[in-house]
Image: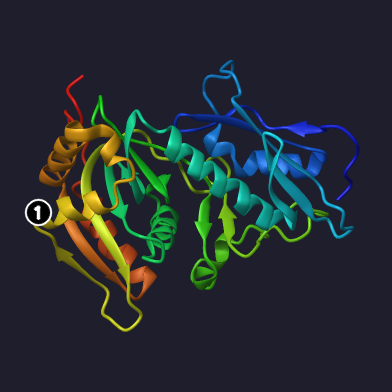
Amino acid sequence: MGFEGGWVHRTPNLRALSYRFAVRTESESLGRQLEALLAGLRDPVETAPVEHWYSLTAADASDGAVDVRRDGEELAHGQQPGDAMGWLVSDVNRAAAEAGGDHLLFHAGGIETDGTGVLLPGASGSGKSTLVAGLVRGGLGYLTDELVALNMATGRLMPYAKPITVKPGSFAVLSDMSPDVGLEPGLGPWAGQEWQVAVGDGTGRRIGRPCVPGFVVLPHYDSGAETALTPLSETEAFFALAVNAVNLIHHGSEGTLALGRLAKRCRCFSLTVSDLDEACRLVLELVVPRAEASAGGVGRAP
């Protein structure tokens, strides 16, 4: 991989909601690839202090493997670049959730169209990241595939434009998103056990803007069922959102009230998914014709 002594490359300052960090490497080529992959998290406040450092350094092995550290603490040893990236992104997700006290956070994907946001809550394995990837490929704006943040002051959903994480079961239906497509020579396999897919400029996958929530869609993958949307009642939507709220206890009664307003103002559905293209078609037909920016929000009044 061409590592040399000392830090050869560092990314610009990065921000995952309220968590500020940067990444440094001993390899210029690996550093450039990391910078492109994490470009969606670039901190607009370039002078803000970097609170945490990740480092990718050559492992003892001679096969291009790297070690991943955060603030000097080893997170993973001897990983190929694609898998090392997975460790880094996973730790950033954890830290973003812990540092996100100003937001009401949901374990959910999120997309945006014409100023209207769509929450896709669900547990791991529900298919939310695959659905988000398909919808972003279809032209909708990417908010996140992991951690939707509701700004409690404005009532808007905030982008957390981490790389999209694609699991092995979805490689076939998202083969055009393989990280090895167009990879800079000499980096070894970037498409690891899970894919980390870049978003933003130059990728064809645009990042969404802060937006008013308008829809809640709960995806559930079932290979033997018909792909279909089913309306949810306000009560059903409230409990589905509550189950997937990461830090509801932190916000107390204000968080519960925000959940209620969110369930009340959004059109809410359950989505059974067996075919990704059909699922994307149903969601696009649901949200695109009706997506209009609107005033107000579901958090506290400013």
Give the amino acid at mark 1.
Thr
Front residue of this view, candidates 33 and 141: 33
Quarter of the view holding residue 38: top right
Residue 41 lies, in percent from the top left, at 53, 35
Q: Residue at x 36, y 50 (%)?
A: 107
Q: Position of residue 51 (x, y in %)?
A: 59, 25
Colouring: rainbow
63 lies left or right of 121: right
Q: Residue at x 26, y 79 (%)?
A: 226
Q: Which residue appears farthest toward the bottom when viewing the image?
A: 224
Residue on which the image places disc 1: 235
- 138 left or right of 185 in image: left
Q: Quadrant of the C terminus?
A: top left
Q: Would you say 78 lies left or right of 105 here?
A: right
The foreground one among 194 and 113 is: 194
At 71% from the left and 36% from the top, the residue drawn is 72
Image: 1 above or below 159: below
Residue in view at x 45 percent, y 29 percent: 18
Front residue of 283/72: it is: 72
- Whether residue 269 is visible to the viewer of this picture, yes or no, is yes
Q: Is residue 182 visible?
A: no
Task: Give the secondary structure at mark 1.
Answer: helix
Give coordinates of residue 289: x percent, y percent.
Answer: 21, 50
- Residue occupying the far top of the picture: 47
Give the class, few, some or many, for how many residues have Cα within 10 Å of label 1's Cα (few <14, many ≥20).
few
Q: Quadrant of residue 6?
A: top right
